[in-house]
Image (cartoon, coloured by chain):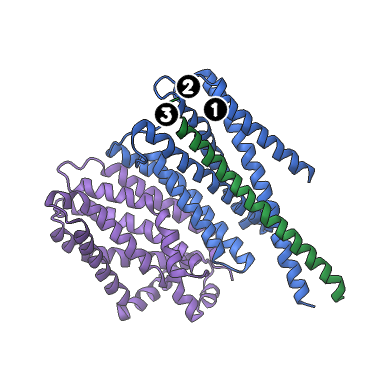
Chain colours: A blue, B green, C purple
């Protein structure tokens, strides 16, 4: 229990520190001004989201291989946290884009791929609600999760290739291209903070799922008597 | 300061999503814990 | 090789079942036709617009039709309780999938070929000059749709709300196929089709990736 509290405290501290750094330590960007600072939060959350989906993929593989419920618990936890991250990305993106470029949305490669990613993981979670038997649910959602993850690079490259045939405004052009050194440090610190936050949320969700499973087991025992 | 309200909105929504997500987990966890205790107490009685 | 012979036997069973009634093919053809007509009512395209948007709409119609056409794939087995006997009959469960996905690809392709003349007329597209490339794109795209669709059909057959679930799972997964197939098809109707090489290669990669995934994980999809 105390380890979880420490993780929570560290996560909150890092997130607050990252926000402070984004506003007071990072230099002001020349063309966009204040609003560019959303980038640290937005892009760091995107990276954390992608990492949690990778964790989900590994959990799915491990479940199919070993069939231990803990991998199913990890799979659903990381999928939900990843979905939360991507939701934040999809909302903060347009909030940034509108004052700067005058449009809420554009079908560029990154935004579109992110949206498809969001849809895939919503489907993953919806699939889980539609299968009642726990072991079947774990297996079938793990298999869908594997297919979905294999699809992600294909989605990204197909849309990027398509977009080069039909050029559109590129929002948030190359985040890594030529970033000022202080900006880089603030960015990577934000990335760290969001990863720790995601880890904390995954742990909490995992504990909930584990308890759910215990409840099912106990309920069946009570029924048997 | 230009666009301060947009920056504010972005951070509010962003942290808001994570906060609401955590709150739903915490609430369900405490409900579950109560339910689990209830069930655990009913078990030895039946024996 | 027993995989080959098992697949061949199962494939002929799939084909015979369908060609006895032909209900799947006819309903799918009519469905795509209706969707294409509805699109033109919704958009009222000019001749130029037809040529530009037509291929994208065609592929969208194919995707919708496929997500309906793939429903009975494993549902039929489940309703008739034939899946367990199928599994016992073959040494490699992949042959079940292989037979179904080949059958589905053939059905889809046949539907598309029947649709082509209507598409060419309604949307004023010159399909004849590059017809061989067009058929290749249709084949690779349909194969991708079938591979993913057959796998996901096995999943959705075991869940509730399966009629809605299959399209929900399938359509986001098939975005790459839609995007690339539509883009290549559009370019085929332009004066200088330049994008076809990369696009066709991409579709082939998609097909290989999902075929491999199905080969690796297929047996788990059929677990009781």
Q: Residues within 10 Å of mark 3 (few under 14, many from 20)?
A: few
Q: Mark 1 and mark 3: span between their CA atoms? A: 14 Å
Residue behind mark 1: A187
Quadrant of the rendering where the C terminus of chain C is positioned: bottom right
Callout 1 touching callout 2 (CB < 8 Å): yes
Quarter of the figure with residue C144: bottom left
Q: Is residue B38 above or below residue B20?
A: below
Q: Position of residue C160 (x, y in %)?
A: 51, 70
Q: Secondary structure at mark 3?
A: loop
Residue behind mark 2: A179
| Same chain check for tags 1 and 3 | yes
Residue C1 visible in the current orientation: no
Q: Please give the chain letter of the residue carrying mark 2.
A: A
Residue C140 visible in the current orientation: yes
Counting labels gives 3
| Same chain check for tags 1 and 2 | yes
Q: Earlier in the sequence, mark 1 or mark 2?
A: 2
Of the numbered discs in the image, which one, if any, rests on residue A166?
A: none
Residue C195 vs residue A97: left or right? left
Quarter of the figure with residue A196: top right
Q: Is residue C14 above or below residue C196?
A: below
Of the numbered discs in the image, which one, if any, rests on residue A174?
A: 3
Q: Residues within 10 Å of mark 2 (few under 14, many from 20)?
A: few
Quarter of the figure with residue C196: top left
| Same chain check for tags 2 and 3 | yes
For the residue pair A217 and C82, the one nearer the viewer reads as A217
Q: Earlier in the sequence, mark 2 or mark 3?
A: 3
Q: Position of residue C47 (x, y in %)?
A: 12, 52
Q: Secondary structure at mark 2?
A: loop
Q: Please give the chain letter of the residue carrying mark 1.
A: A
The nearer-to-camera label among 1 and 3 is: 1
Q: Position of residue C140 (x, y in %)?
A: 33, 54
């Amino acid at each position: 229990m105390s380890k979880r509290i420490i993780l929570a405290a560290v996560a909150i501290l890092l997130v607050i520190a990252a926000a402070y750094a984004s506003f007071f330590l990072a230099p002001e960007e020349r063309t966009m001004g204040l609003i560019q600072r959303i980038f640290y939060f937005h892009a760091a959350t995107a990276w954390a989201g992608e990492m949690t989906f990778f964790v989900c993929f590994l959990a799915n593989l491990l479940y199919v291989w070993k069939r231990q419920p803990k991998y199913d618990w990890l799979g659903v936890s990381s999928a939900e946290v990843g979905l939360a991250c991507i939701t934040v990305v999809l909302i903060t993106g347009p909030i940034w884009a509108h004052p700067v470029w005058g449009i809420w949305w554009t079908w560029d490669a990154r935004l579109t791929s992110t949206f498809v990613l969001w849809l895939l993981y919503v489907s993953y979670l919806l699939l889980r609600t539609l299968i009642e038997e726990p072991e079947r649910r774990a297996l079938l959602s793990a298999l869908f999760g594997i297919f979905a993850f294999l699809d992600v690079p294909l989605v990204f490259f197909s849309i990027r290739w398509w977009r080069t045939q039909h050029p559109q405004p590129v929002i948030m052009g190359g985040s890594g291209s030529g970033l000022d050194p202080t900006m880089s440090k603030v960015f990577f610190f934000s990335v760290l903070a969001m990863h720790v936050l995601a880890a904390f949320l995954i742990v909490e969700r995992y504990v909930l799922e584990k308890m759910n499973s215990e409840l099912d087991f106990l309920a069946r025992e009570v029924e048997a008597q | 300061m230009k666009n301060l309200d947009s920056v504010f909105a972005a951070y509010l929504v962003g942290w808001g999503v994570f906060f609401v997500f955590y709150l739903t987990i915490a609430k369900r966890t405490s409900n579950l814990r109560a339910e689990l205790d209830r069930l655990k107490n009913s078990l030895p009685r039946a024996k | 090789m027993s995989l080959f012979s098992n697949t061949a036997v199962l494939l002929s069973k799939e084909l015979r079942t369908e060609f006895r009634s032909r209900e799947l093919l006819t309903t799918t053809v009519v469905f795509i036709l209706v969707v294409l007509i509805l699109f033109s009512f919704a958009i009222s395209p000019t001749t130029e617009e037809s040529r530009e948007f037509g291929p994208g709409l065609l592929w969208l119609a194919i995707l919708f039709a496929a997500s309906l056409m793939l429903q009975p794939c494993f549902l039929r087995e489940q309703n008739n309780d034939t899946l367990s006997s199928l599994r016992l009959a073959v040494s490699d469960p992949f042959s079940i999938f292989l037979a179904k996905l080949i059958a589905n690809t053939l059905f889809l392709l046949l539907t598309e070929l029947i649709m082509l003349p209507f598409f060419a007329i309604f949307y004023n597209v010159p399909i004849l000059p590059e017809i061989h490339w067009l058929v290749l794109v249709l084949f690779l795209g349909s194969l991708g749709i079938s591979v993913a669709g057959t796998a996901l059909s096995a999943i959705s057959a075991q869940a509730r709300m399966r009629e809605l679930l299959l399209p929900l799972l399938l359509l986001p997964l098939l975005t790459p196929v839609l995007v690339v197939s539509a883009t290549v098809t559009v370019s085929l109707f332009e004066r200088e089709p330049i994008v076809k090489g990369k696009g066709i290669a991409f579709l082939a990669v998609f097909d290989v990736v999902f075929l491999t995934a199905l080969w690796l994980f297929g047996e788990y999809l059929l677990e009781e």
